Image (spheres, rainbow, N blue to C red):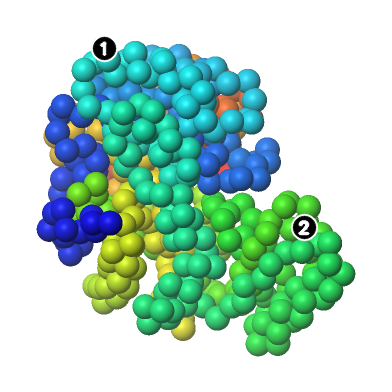
Amino acid sequence: MESVLTKAPRNTGMMHNKPFRSFIQHSDNELLIFGTDNFPQFPNRDGAILSRCNRALAVAGNQDLVVLRTALDRDYQDWLHANGLGTDHIVEYGAQSDEMTLSEMIVKNPDPILEVISKLGRAPVYVPWFSGRMEKVAANLLGADLFGSSESLTRTYNDKVSFKHICRKLGISTIEGDAFEVSPEKTENYFQFEKKIRRHLSTTHTVIVRGALGEAGMSLYKTAGDDIPELYRQIADSGEKVLIIEPFEDVISSPNDQWIIGRAGNIIHMGIREQVCEKGMVYIGTLKGKSYPPAVCESISKTSLKIVNHMSRAGYTGVVGIDYIITENGTYPVENNARFNGSTYVGMIIENIENKLLSSIPYWKFLKLKTTPISFPELATKLRPILYDNGKLNCVFPYDCKTLPVSGNLGVIILATDIERMHHLEKEVKKLGIKR
């Protein structure tokens, strides 16, 4: 099979000022179809995993199509339109359960999307969150190019165990650790689990246990050795199959280095951002604007380029977000988000706002927060003094608000001209009862 790298010259990872979408969409004659369902990443789902297709509403331009598993949040959509954002091209599947992924729903009934494609008359490109088997099937059924890869490639790099093996083959240092397969039906399995944890506890105070496919704090555990039986039972009950057991490092900083491997095989470096982590390990947000020392940036970028070149040679297409930890002992890659990252969508929203401002936004911060369950209009009223308003800076942009009326969960993006104003706005949000 012809390598994708023979079809176009490969970029070596230089930074670009072009908008993110320009590396997905080759021309204005293409229709981007956003399906931001993250269910395909999780074969075993529980109540903590939400589909979150609504993330694309603020990402999409007026010529794009957004596909939703459930129903449109019309109040939020009206607010976006009032601020010159979003699209009118939306397909709602109105799902009442979590049994099917969005791509499975498209395969079952592609007609609503095919009707929009026919009406708009542009070549479709399907842009999912995570590329599983059904994402390719859905793209083929829609006659669309897929901005993504095969399921096997996606899982190879997204899986923390196999990613660590790849790093070691490439000569990249990683945190010392053990892979472990969970088999609760075998009596000796628990004792093997405990033995591996105790081995690490002989040289460190705390051990971290990570699920191979978890993300954003899911399948993430920490132990000092006093609760190992309870920990094992919790993991076994979760259905987790493969773990990484590692010493818990004192983390100074947690950079995310984001890249794109385009549909033509070109490699683009989108830059390094700071991840905001709770208790040193659970991702709760992203900060853009923090400056790392040049030597740190160079080291991270060189390491990432080795990984991304490996992925490109294997035929991977899509977003690559490599998470690092900076410790007193060194800087290590710990995870490869071989899919759209949460901050990818935030970055695209920022680009939409920058187009309205006709200038760049020096600082932004995305945070996952919570308040009392309220409607979006009630939230907008509460935030009114600092609410984003049609292209202004030093404000708060609500995002990912679908479950706000039920759970009170939401995301906010704080836009600021300097770090002091950002800290002030974050305090103002907290005063309004919107916090962790």
Residue at 84 percent of width and 62 percent of height: 185
Residue 356's x, y, as percent? 19, 29
Q: Dot 2 corresponds to which residue? A: 236
* Disc 2 and disc 1 in contact, CB within 8 angstroms: no
Residue at 51 percent of width and 78 percent of height: 175
Please indicate, yes or no, whether residue 406 appears anywhere in the rendered image. Answer: yes
Cα gap from disc 2 to disc 1, whole angstroms: 50 Å
Which comes sooner in the sequence, label 2 or label 1?
1
Residue at 84 percent of width and 74 percent of height: 188
Residue 28's x, y, as percent? 15, 29
Comparing 349 with 93, the one in front is 93
Comparing 204 with 396, the one in front is 204
Residue 116 image-quadrant placement: top left
Task: Name which residue type carries label 1.
Answer: Lys
- In the image, is 206 to the left or to the right of 22? right
81 vs 54: above or below: above
Q: Residue furthest front?
A: 1
402 vs 337: above or below: above
- In the image, is 229 to the left or to the right of 342? right
Q: Dot 1 corresponds to which residue? A: 119
Quadrant placement of the N terminus: bottom left
Please indicate, yes or no, whether residue 337 appears anywhere in the rendered image. Answer: no
Does dot 1 land on a helix, a strand or a loop?
A: helix
Quadrant placement of the C terminus: top right
Residue at 65 percent of width and 45 percent of height: 44
Does dot 2 land on a helix, a strand or a loop?
A: helix
Task: Name which residue type carries label 2.
Answer: Ala
